[in-house]
Amino acid sequence: VLVSTESISALVELRRVQPSSMFLRGLSGQELHQLAEIASLKVYPARANVFQTGEPTKHFHLLLAGVWKISQEAPNGQFINLAFRFPGHVVGVHSVLGSTTYPFSADVIAPSKVLFWHPPTLSTFMRQTANLTWNVCEILNLALYEFCDRYRELMTENVEQRTAHALIRLVEQLGKRKGPELIIDTPISLEDLAGYAGTTLFTISRILNRWQRGGLLRKNRRLLIVEDLELLKTIADATYARPDTARVASAGSRPR
Amino acid sequence: VLVSTESISALVELRRVQPSSMFLRGLSGQELHQLAEIASLKVYPARANVFQTGEPTKHFHLLLAGVWKISQEAPNGQFINLAFRFPGHVVGVHSVLGSTTYPFSADVIAPSKVLFWHPPTLSTFMRQTANLTWNVCEILNLALYEFCDRYRELMTENVEQRTAHALIRLVEQLGKRKGPELIIDTPISLEDLAGYAGTTLFTISRILNRWQRGGLLRKNRRLLIVEDLELLKTIADATYARPDTARVASAGSRPR
DNA sequence: CGATGAATTGACCGATGTCAAGTGGCGTGG
DNA sequence: CCACGCCACTTGACATCGGTCAATTCATCG
């Protein structure tokens, strides 16, 4: 049989990300092979736009390397970051379930490599592959959990707590451990962070600087180093009974 | 073969709700029959609690009649309504995906009838029934869409718009058309509404009364009648450029 | 008809968004 | 290699939405 070089490298990539991908969990070598045959490979530079809200759905993506930002623009122009996507994650699940336009935009934050599929083709394959359908169920279920959590946080927590939660989520996904420190070397703008935490870049700026003065983290334009994850978690869960004033990291901030 | 009376009535109920249930869409008579055999039937009175956050997962539910409220309590005691559930909806999808505790509470708002399944049993059946797994995928996908929308709304819209959206969602599900009016005869407390719109019962009270004075709706303790759905939608989508003052339904409200 | 819980209304105020005016680091082009 | 300009970020002043609490009023049910 004919086997294209593209499907060979696709197979190599699939094997490589399988351990870190819910999408590929439990698939047999045979199934990976079939997936690879209908996949294509592509590379994106940083800052590229992959697709925009409202565009007709062209592809289902599996991220192999890099970081993507999934966002929406509100009618008033404000930007909301629904999620960040990392290697092993999929983007555009809705496409295989019959949705014909993208309900959000995807932008490349760190140079990326992806496999992508033609939705109807993948959809057909999924229907024959019980494992794959099940995996998609689990992915959606997990995403739903996360959104419920973030919805509740947005509704009940103050900006500082939400920012802490946002940072924790980020650190868990792309923080590189180095002794007691966690390093994020993907340059995420304050605006992106704000859109993720549900606030404005002004407020984020104030909070991060306050935390920096308090020794919770260090940062510059392209690096963010969390020095005290425990304190961050304390702030995030600060279950103060009521409109409390004793803010953990505010102690010793600016005099007035 | 032996067929219990319970599984017979379960089958009758399954046939009845099938047209309005995403969960049962496309299932064959044979499959419905098998589902019925492993199902149980139960009735709940209004105000009953079905399960609480954190309880071990006992059942997967399919609502046949009535209305349920799915909620969480925030650490500070505030109540959040994640969703209302109506006939044809399922509750506790996470249980068949291996989750062992309920991440939310379910309470009965209007007297209800449900079919329920033992999660591992249903899980096994689902794995053999591609259609069912696919349906669950679509349900989860839709729920995810809704939460993304509500997340964005919570982040970008003011309370009046969010309240409008909440009311629209309610009316679409349980509004009974009567001429130009839409009647909601399920008594939903202001507190429940507040938890659904992401605000407090005080603010909800003020907004509903303002709308009532503006002729958008009428209400009493147990009935809510939307008289002008179009206006409601206008308020919900009010895409005013910036902190605008010309609020649609505020015109002609209280003198001060 | 009284008790109970739900809803109303007012007064207050604080967290956080908005806007304006810097500041500084980085990359590009001369 | 330096200088310029740009863009991301910072910081302050201010306004305001909507949450909090307290005091009533209202309906419904026994």
Image: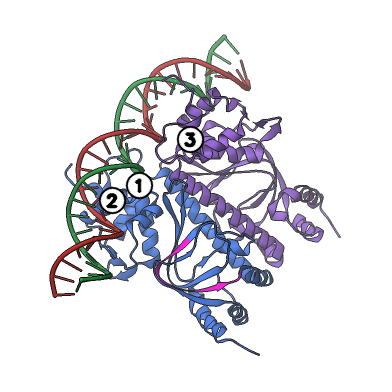
Chain colours: A blue, B purple, C green, D red
Residue position marked by numbered label 3 in the rendering: B160
Bounds of the magenta segment? A106-118
Residue A50 in percent (x, y) is at: 48, 66
Label pair 2/1, CB-CB below 8 angstroms? yes
- Amino acid carrying mark 2 in the image: Ile
Residue position marked by numbered label 1 in the rendering: A159
Tag 1, which secondary structure? Answer: helix
Residue at 31%, 55% (x, y): give it.
A232
Q: Is residue A7 above or below residue A233?
A: below
B254 on left or right of B47? left
B30 on left or right of B203? right
- Amino acid carrying mark 3 in the image: Glu
Is the residue marked by circle 1 packed among few (<14), some (14-19), or many (20+) residues within 10 Å?
A: many
Q: Quadrant of the N terminus of chain A?
A: bottom right
Residue at 77%, 50% (x, y): give it.
B10
Residue D21 in percent (x, y) is at: 37, 28
Label pair 1/3, CB-CB below 8 angstroms? no
Q: CA distance from mark 2 to mark 1?
A: 9 Å
